[in-house]
Amino acid sequence: MANTQSKEVTLAKRVQASKGLRYCPVVLSPNERAKPGLVIVNGQPERHSGDPQRLTNRHLNGFL
């Protein structure tokens, strides 16, 4: 039986944006590590500190 589960996850952070709270992807450094406090909002990196980062699984369309 083949493994059909997705191995891809997304690291996101919940931030206060102009349209309210939303989950935004974090900025990754060249060695693919998350840069602390940096997220992508409307295509631009912004600094947001405070709330923890979370892993999401695109296959399940939810948070782990």
Image: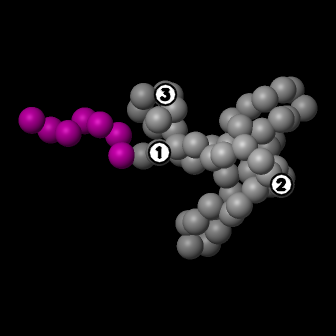
Name the amino acid type tagged 2.
Answer: Arg
Queried whether the magenta region covers residue 4, the answer comes back as: yes
Chain-order first, disc 3 or disc 1: 1
Residue displayed at 50% across by 28% down: 62
Looking at the picture, how far across and down is residue 40, in whole percent?
A: 75, 49
| Residue at screen point 77% across, 48% down | 50
Q: Which residues are magenta?
A: 1-7
- Which is nearer the N-term, disc 2 or disc 1? 1
Residue 6 appears in the rendering: yes
Q: Around disc 3, counting alpha carbons within 10 Å, would you say few (fewer than 14), some (14 to 19), or many (20 or more)?
A: few
Q: Residue at x 49, y 27 (%)?
A: 61
Tag 2: Cα neighbours inside 10 Å, few (<14), some, or many (≥20)? some
Toward the left, the furthest residue is 1
The residue pinned by badge 2 equals: 47
Q: Amino acid at mark 1?
A: Val
- For the image, the number of numbered tags is 3
The reply to whether the C-beta atoms of the residues labelled 3 and 2 are less than 8 Å apart is no
CA gap, disc 3 to disc 1?
10 Å
Reply above or below: 31 against 63: below
In the rendered image, which residue does mark 1 sit on?
Answer: 9
Q: Which residue is mark 3?
A: 61
The one of 16 and 42 positioned closer to us in this rendering: 16
Q: Amino acid at mark 3?
A: Asn
In the rendered view of the protein, which quadrant contains the N terminus?
Answer: top left
Q: Which residue is nearer to you in this view: 55 or 3?
A: 55
Left or right: 31 as drawn, with respect to 41: left
Q: How is the image coloured?
A: one colour
